[in-house]
Image (cartoon, helix red, strand yellow):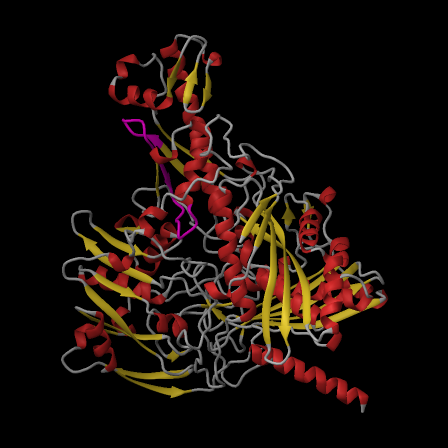
Amino acid sequence: MTNTSDRAETGPGLAGMSENGQAGEGIGARVLRKEDVRHVHGRGQFVGDLSMPGLSEVAFVRSPVAHGRLLAVGKPLGQERRVIVREDMASVKAIRSRITAPTFKVSEQNPLAHGKVRFVGEPIAACFAPTRAAAEDLAESVTIDIEELPAVMDAMAARTGVAVPLHEEWGDSLFLTTSADTGIEEVARTAPVVVTRDYRLSRQVMNPLEGKAILAHWDERAGQLVIYLSTQIPHMMRTAFAEHLGIEQEKIRVIAPDVGGGFGYKCVLHPEELCIAWLAWTRKRPFRWIEDRREHLVGGANCREHYYRVTAYADRRGKLLGLDAEITIDAGAYSVWPFTACLEGTMAGGHLPGPYVVGAYRARTFTVATNKPSIVPYRGVARTGICFAMELTIDALAREVGREPADVRRENLVPASLMPYTNPTGKVYDSGDYARSLDLAVERIGVPAFRERQAAARAEGRLIGVGFANYIEMTAHGMMMFAAAGLPFVPGYEQALVRFTPDGGLELRVGVQSHGQGMETSLAQIAHEILGVPVARIAVVHGDTAMTPYSTGTYASRSITMAGGAVSRACKALAERLVQIGAHLLQCRTDQIRLSAGRLLGPSGDIGVMEVATIWYLTPQLLPPGVHPGGMEVTESFRPKVDTGQYSYGTHAAVVAVDAEFGRVEILDYVIVEDCGTMVNPMIVEGQTYGGFAQGLGTALFEEARYDAGGQPLTSTLADYLLPGAAEMPRVEMLHTETPSPNTEFGIKGVGEGGAIPPPAAIFNAVNDALRSLSVEVSETPLSPRRLLSALAAGRASVIGGAS
């Protein structure tokens, strides 16, 4: 893997030298991640590493059928107190989430199934014992009686009705339908070129290294239920536990220790977590549950089962005149708290045009309930699907008009001169030069030379192809969008507390939670940029509701923008106080003081900011009269000037070889051009992007959660559910451009999801380019050998049928 920096614009400190002159640690510097020291030496602390006297481990009895009426649950004789069913938890509220859309239907998910089971793996009973093995033995002795019902497994068929709906009070199987139309009919009547395609993204499972994990106990001294939880949103989870258990929030403390990956899986409330918290609350002793891999694959939250029918209307050069889409989302059995089952559908309908000017636009979305685990937000939330549908449509359009796909793509991109640009559904793209990103990728691939190489290979019987995919990544969308949707929470101002310690170190306290992003390093770099304190002397405190300011947490690539903005504001406020004290100590006016490289420079001397902090605490008699009483501790907040989100973007390009005999796809070359505004730490940006690419590669070629017609999972182990490993990762070249956002501190945008969005589109476009001479197109993920061979066989049959 290689990387190249190609900066479209420059922001502060982007050459590895911070504005205050401190080389190698400010914004733009490749500072080594502070958190890696403990992780590479095995000293991280996860929920599984915790231990407490009297700890009970919990195992769950799970539904063996996808759909049925739960008639009875039998507890083993003599062990009744160690087996919990829904009736034992009567005071606990069922999980309900809603939005204000008039067509939205609320589902109700009990922490343990009651009345009905709606997917294989749904928890029915919780069993506890001193060890997990003993708890699992106990679970095996629990009996259940279920009257099986027909399983609803086909979301497309379920749109028009099913024999027995999952939620019978609905009368159908639709969580939500939406529609947007800016006037497609006139374009549809007159457009000279019309291209229609169907696409499908298969269901996936997220597979972070650490699955769900929770340990809860009662702290008698504090009078609090203390919950150690592998979560991305500790403050929101405290709200969730309080609401569902009926406990005041001051009696709950949520602590997120090290978190072994999340990807969106750990930003919702799971029923098992409610059960563990309730056990600890009612029994006043510790309980723990750690999800194993089979539980994760069978009963854990799923993601990304999308169906698209897209029609593009264009002129004879391929310029888009209109876009018409019908989008169906298989949302599984329940609507998750707090984001609901409808996030995927609303995001898809609102962002399908991506970085393109589409003219007229119509999108109808259908979010459907099926007898599968609920889908939850997964890295890229719907944008992987819409990028796949949009980018494959652009290539199909290019083939229709007989032009190079990169050229058609470029002519349809939103030009930089139109920024900020409002898309057809009102989403505001804050800044960007999309064409430059594409041009860099095209240049690196060398398209004209590749076409010559491709023709020569075809003459030798080899199939190679090139594919491109442009993407946008909406990051840190805020209050107005969440309020308009009527979600059960609305993010507002993000806060950060910054304070010096008596010996001159710096503490940053933030409410967001890291689960691998490196924010202990990047947030420290922002503070260093302003105050000049060495990164090694900056501690980032997060993940504990008792010690940090309130935050809705880490999701939607928001943490570096929001928490970073709050840290920046707090450090600037603290710098003003330092200047006041420094002027007094250096016997000059405040306007004669300059803060640089961690020192306050005056006309006749200087003093370090760390020394000033020590004076505040230990020798306050030296302070000036009228000094700010807040001293060396500041809490500040941040919200972007425009809070509809900052849009990162980029282009991926893939060169592939297709083995038509065995159905294999080999990635020969891969180029990533990404722009996330001002990069705080390019190394961390690249790590995020490489990791996202690996997940996108899994979506494209490997990952699929499969079920039989009765709802039984067919991929319950990692022998059946395939994940890419190091051996499957190709060489990747990465290039950066930097187009700062006008709405954030230092022009920063989020970058957590972008790498995962375009790989399926780029790879499929490359495969379709390779198969162009055979008149074969592939459009369903993952592109397994079986699917590729089936498409080739269908193509040959079509050719033979046409000839006859």
Q: Nearer the viewer, residue 232 or 207?
A: 207
Res 644 visible: no
Residue positioned 51% across, 49% down in the render: 686
Q: Main secondary structure of the magenta part?
A: loop
Q: Quadrant of the C terminus?
A: bottom right
Give the image location of residue 607, x and y in percent. 37, 17
Q: Is residue 677 above or below residue 423?
A: above
Give the image location of residue 660, x and y in percent. 64, 78
Q: Is residue 503 magenta?
A: yes
Give the image location of residue 190, x and y in percent. 86, 65
Which residue is situated farthest in the bottom direction here? 804
Q: Quarter-wise, where is residue 626 in the image? A: top left
Res 479 visible: yes
Q: Nearer the viewer, residue 347 or 395?
A: 395
Q: In the rendered structure, which segment of residues is drawn in magenta?
A: 499-518
Q: Is residue 625 magenta?
A: no
Residue positioned 16% across, 77% down in the render: 79
Give the image location of residue 482, x and y in percent. 52, 52
Q: Nearer the viewer, residue 368 or 355?
A: 355
Left or right placement of residue 26 versus residue 536 in this view: right
Q: Total number of numbered labels?
A: 0
